Amino acid sequence: MTFKDILKDSFLKNYELMNLETVDILIIMGITALLALYMFFIYRFMTRKGFYNKAFNIALPAVALITAAIIITIQSSVIVSLGMVGALSIVRFRTAIKDPLDLVFMFWAISIGIICGAGLHVVALIVSIIVTAVIYLLDLIPAIKDASILVVQTNDNGMENAIKKKIDVYAKHYRIKSRNMTVTGMDMVVELSVKEGDKLLKDICALEGVENVSLLDHDGEVTF
């Protein structure tokens, strides 16, 4: 017997195969489907205040079921498992997930598939309940108001101090992001956190020489 044969026999002995009957497979896929549907409705509930991506939500249960099927296949055959690893290693996903919460749900779907495929249904159920509770409780915490962008256009390039005085009344902290000054006027961009934005706009508009003023909300990724 060669060294190659010894290594092969040792590997096969240490690799425990799982011989699943059709009923067992159906039970695993059924439990996975139930947990995936649960996650489907949780995602729909959590995105009620924002943009709901139905295609992504449909993809979540599908990912969980496909992952569970892969895990079942890997546990049933050594040859198939090695081939599956090689096939999956060349897969490249090009779709970018912009919302961090979507990324959480995607990992949740994959985890459900892996855990259920391994036969640990109770673990998958506990994980789903804990993840739901954590997401829901953290969602109840009020968010800090994001900074806003104030854009002021004037026909007088000497109005910066007057505009600053108006801003001081409504905002404790602000930062001038840019100034664009010409002979006949000035454009000014200010980052600030303000609660009474409508009153601030009215006061600045009342200044003589102001042509246009806008208040924009942003998520902190705007640069000038």
Image (cartoon, rainbow, N blue to C red):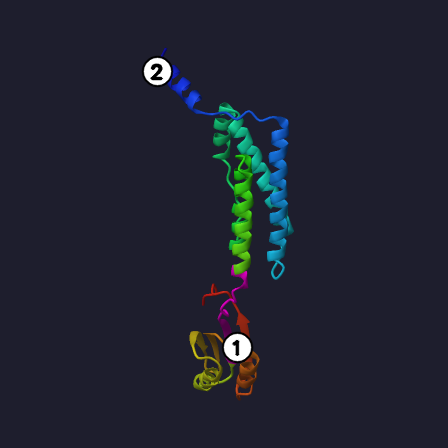
Q: Toward the viewer: 195 or 124?
A: 124
The amino acid pointed to by label 1 is Lys
Residue holding disc 1:
195
Residue 148 shown in magenta: yes
Residue at the image position 52 percent from the left and 39 percent from the top: 115
Q: Nearer the viewer, residue 76 or 187?
A: 76
Q: Quadrant of the N terminus?
A: top left
Name the one closer to the observer, 102 or 75. 75
Instruction: Work out which quarter of the rendered image holds the C terminus and state it.
Output: bottom left
Q: Describe the element under mark 1 as helix, strand or loop.
A: loop
Residue 199 in the magenta stretch? The answer is: no
Mark closer to the chain start, 2 or 1: 2
Label ID, residue 145: none
Q: Amino acid at mark 2?
A: Phe
Specify the segment rendered in magenta: 138-153
For residue 3, the mark is 2
